[in-house]
Each structure stands twice: as structure tokens, then as C-alpha cells.
Image: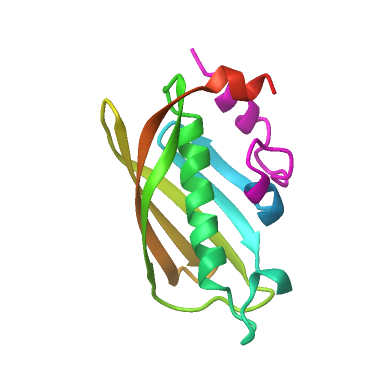
Amino acid sequence: MTSPQLEFFKSQIGKTLDQTPSAAGNWLSGTLLEIEPGFVKVSYTIRPDMCNPAKILHGGIASLMMDDVIGMANFVSESEVLMTSINLNVDFLSSAKLGEKVEVSAKLVRSGSNLNHWESVIRKESGKVVAKASSNMIKTHIKIKEILNQ
């Protein structure tokens, strides 16, 4: 049986993500490309408000993209409670310029009883890696159905 949150996000494939439970993710306004348990891929076009003064993707925004895609992937997992990041380790490997498109993917590496470990990558259309991250998500006491009913 598929969770209501996975069903919702599957209905958003190919659409702009601006009506999700994540206000920060709505601001990013990516386009959902793929979603399944344990994996998500979203595309973004680098806008001026995502750039540093050199007109390249700001590291904080790159981190937000990966954290949000990991969070989305975790949100549609089998957990009945919300999970939150306890760390985000980011490596910045190259730049993405204003106007460029990037794809951000998140993949579940390990699911435990209280923690999920994720990896995320930002790639340019050429395939070049812009940044990569790993994150651990821990269970909270907030039930997902409470979030969905807000």
C-alpha cells in the first residue's frame, strides 16, 4: 500500500513544486522528475536570488536543495512520524552559473529503527557534479498524518 504523501508527490511529477509541506522547498520551485521509496530527483534552474555576487549558485542554496530533496524523499518513506536532519555534510566540487539547470537526487543508503542515512548529488546537464552531501535523519514525535491535516 502506498502512503498518501507518496501518492501526492507522484501526482506532482513534471510539475513545479510550489505547494508542498516545505515552505523552503516551495521557494526553490523545482520540478519533480522522479520519486519512489528511497529515491527522488528534482530539477532546478539557477535564478538570481539563488546566486552569490559572482552569479554562481550560493553554497547555502545548494545545501538547501540537497537537504530539501533528502527531506522530501524521507517524507514519502514508510515512517509514520516525521524525521528531521541531524547533520548535513556537503562537498562543493564545481560551480553552477546563473541560468543553468541542475538535477538534485537523493538516495537512501541505510534505513534503521531511528535513523535514515541519505546521500544527495547536484549535477549539471553535462553530468558534472556540482556538490554532494550525506545526511542522517532522526525520528521525531510528530506524526505525518498531523502534518497532512494542517
Chief SS of the magenta region: loop
**Is residue 20 at least partly visible in the picture?**
yes
Q: Please tell me whether residue 3 belongs to the stretch shown in magenta.
A: yes
| Image position, residue 25 (x, y; %) | 63, 48
- Among the 4 quarters of the image, the one containing residue 91: bottom left
Residue 20, quarter of picture? top right
What residue do we see at 67% from left, 19% from top? 149
Of residues 139 and 124, the one nearer the viewer is: 139
Image position of 98 with respect to 64: above or below: below
Quick check: can you spot residue 47? no
* Residue furthest front as drawn: 141
Q: Residue 99, image x and y in percent?
A: 69, 74
Looking at the image, the residue that sits furthest to the bottom is 54
Residue 143 percent coordinates (x, y): 51, 20
Name the residue: 44% across, 78% down.
Answer: 94
Q: Which residue is rendered at x = 60% and y = 19% of the image? A: 146
Left/right placement of residue 136 relative to residue 24 reads: left
Residue 10 sits inside the magenta stretch: yes
In this rendering, the answer to whether 17 lies above or below 3 is below
Judge whether 68 appears above or below 81 on screen.
Answer: below
Which residue is more in the foreground, 102 or 110? 110
Q: Is residue 25 above or below residue 72?
A: below
Span shown in magenta:
1-24
Quadrant for the C terminus, please: top right
Residue reaching furthest to the top: 1
Q: How is the image coloured?
A: rainbow
Q: Position of residue 109 (x, y in %)?
A: 29, 42
> What residue do we see at 69% from left, 47% from top?
26
Q: How many marks?
A: 0
